Image: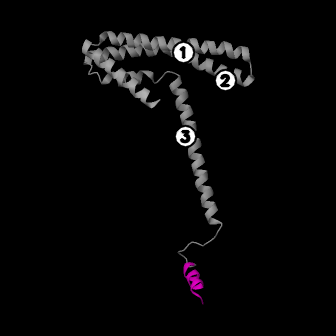
């Protein structure tokens, strides 16, 4: 018996896996399938996240995180909470309308209805503008309750964020 036959005989015991050329491509297929599944799952979750963030629901949380570094007093925190709560309530019907407009716009795109696309796109722009006005009004109210020191700190934070965004682009 030559050494290769002996080695093969030793490997064919109950603990070893059979040596086959078909096994390698199957592993590669499983790996590729797992990778494509992960990519699809990430893509679906990012689409969901983008749609959720586009509705304006996450905006107030970002303002809260941004303002937390200003060292607000408990009274200021309570005031900002009530300001953002009121803004959230007034924005809710606009966000619902925006969601409906976007669904109608998708349907118009699929139907290739150019006039309806123009009308719905203009409506969507107006609703986005209303949400921006609500957010800006809330931030203006919050700005008024800040001390001059906190206002300066906020200006410095905005400049730093602007510089960081400029460096990314």
Q: Residues within 10 Å of mark 3 (few under 14, many from 20)?
A: few
Residue at screen point 55% across, 32% down: 48
Left or right position of 55 against 149? right
Tell me the magenta residue range.
1-11
Contact between labelled residues 1 and 3, with CB atoms less than 8 Å apart: no
Horizontal and vertical percent position of residue 52: 52, 27
Left or right position of 102 against 144? right
Horizontal and vertical percent position of residue 68: 31, 24
- Mark 3 lies on a secondary structure that is helix
Depth check: 81 or 112 in front?
A: 112
CA gap between label 3 and label 1 equals 27 Å
**Residue for badge 2:** 106
The numbered dot on residue 128 is 1
Question: Compared with residue 148, is residue 29 higher up or lower down, i.e. above or below?
Answer: below
Q: Where, by quadrant of the figure, is residue 26 drawn?
A: bottom right
Tell me which label, 3 or 1, sits earlier in the chain: 3
């Amino acid at each position: 018996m030559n050494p290769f036959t002996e080695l093969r005989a030793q490997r064919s015991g109950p603990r070893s896996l059979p040596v086959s050329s078909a096994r390698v491509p199957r592993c590669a297929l499983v790996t590729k399938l797992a990778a494509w599944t992960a990519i699809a799952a990430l893509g679906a979750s990012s689409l969901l996240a983008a749609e959720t963030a586009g509705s304006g629901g996450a905006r107030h949380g970002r303002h809260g995180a941004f303002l937390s570094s200003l060292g607000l007093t408990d009274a200021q925190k309570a005031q900002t909470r009530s300001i953002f709560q009121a803004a959230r309530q007034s924005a809710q019907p606009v966000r619902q309308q925006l969601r409906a407009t976007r669904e109608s716009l998708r349907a118009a795109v699929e139907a290739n209805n150019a006039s309806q696309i123009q009308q719905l796109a203009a409506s969507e722009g107006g609703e986005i503008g209303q949400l921006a006005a609500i957010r800006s009004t809330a931030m203006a109210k919050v700005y008024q309750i800040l001390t001059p020191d906190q206002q300066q700190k906020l200006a410095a934070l905005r400049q730093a964020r602007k510089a960081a965004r400029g460096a990314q682009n």
